[in-house]
Image (cartoon, rainbow, N blue to C red):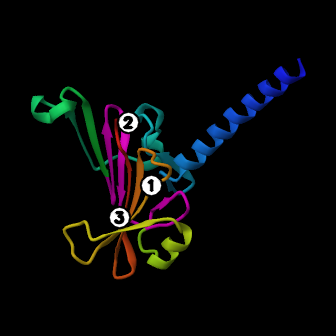
Amino acid sequence: MYLSKLLLAFAICLSHTVSQNNFAVYRDFSFHVEDKSIQVGEFEEHLDLINILGKAKYIEDGILGEDADTYAGIYYKNIDYEDLRLEFFGGSLVTAIFKSDKYKSYRGIKVGDSKGKMLLYYPGIINRGNVTDDPNVIVYELVINNQNYSLDFNVKNMKIIEIRIDYNYQ
């Protein structure tokens, strides 16, 4: 009897720890606008975009056609705000790209911050080198525990010029 209670307590603690760890992983793939947070990977219907971001400058949406390879028939939506682009796929926020210090990463890094500050706040980040069209831009990428998320900082002249958070839709 004692052993079964002990095992039950262990199982409950283990599941709580795993979910807490997952939360810690996923929050790195959110961003902040003032005191509000937006989680990449979240369904659009769960995000209060109007109250958080205001009115969009441009919205494009539709259904992918037959030439869209394996994703034909999937709904997509792209929403542009000032210095922010949100891309939705199948109803989920899959990409957030920001080019302004109005938006911050979960750990507080924003466009205009130094490369040194970014490296201090993200010590395990990977230098992917130059993978953009601009030969002066170096991309640093954070991927945690092989999750389907990535966080990229584009750095030019030792300053962050763009931050991109992706949820790799499966």
Residue at numbered disc 2: 92
Instruction: Give whichever of 12, 48 is nearer the camera.
Output: 12
CA separation in Å, label 2 and label 3: 21 Å
Q: Reply yes or no: does residue 87 show up in magenta.
A: yes
| Label 1 secondary element | loop
The three-letter amino acid code for the residue at tag 1 is Val
Q: Earlier in the sequence, mark 3 or mark 1?
A: 3
Examine the rendered structure and indicate whether residue 79 appears above or below residue 84.
above
Q: Residue furthest top?
A: 1
| Label 2 secondary element | strand
Residue at numbered disc 1: 143
The three-letter amino acid code for the residue at tag 2 is Ser
x, y (%) of residue 68?
15, 35
x, y (%) of residue 165?
39, 53
Examine the rendered structure and indicate whether residue 97 appears above or below residue 167.
below
The three-letter amino acid code for the residue at tag 3 is Lys
Asked if disc 2 and disc 3 are in contact, CB closer than 8 Å, the reply is no
Q: Residue at image x 42%, y 74%?
A: 112
Which stretch is magenta?
Answer: 81-110
Answer yes or no: is residue 155 visible.
yes
Residue at numbered disc 3: 99
Q: Earlier in the sequence, mark 2 or mark 1?
A: 2
Instruction: Give whichever of 167, 12 is nearer the camera.
Output: 12
* Left or right side of 89 for 165: right
* Quarter location, residue 135: bottom left
Observer-side mark, 2 or 3, equals 2
CA separation in Å, label 2 and label 1: 19 Å
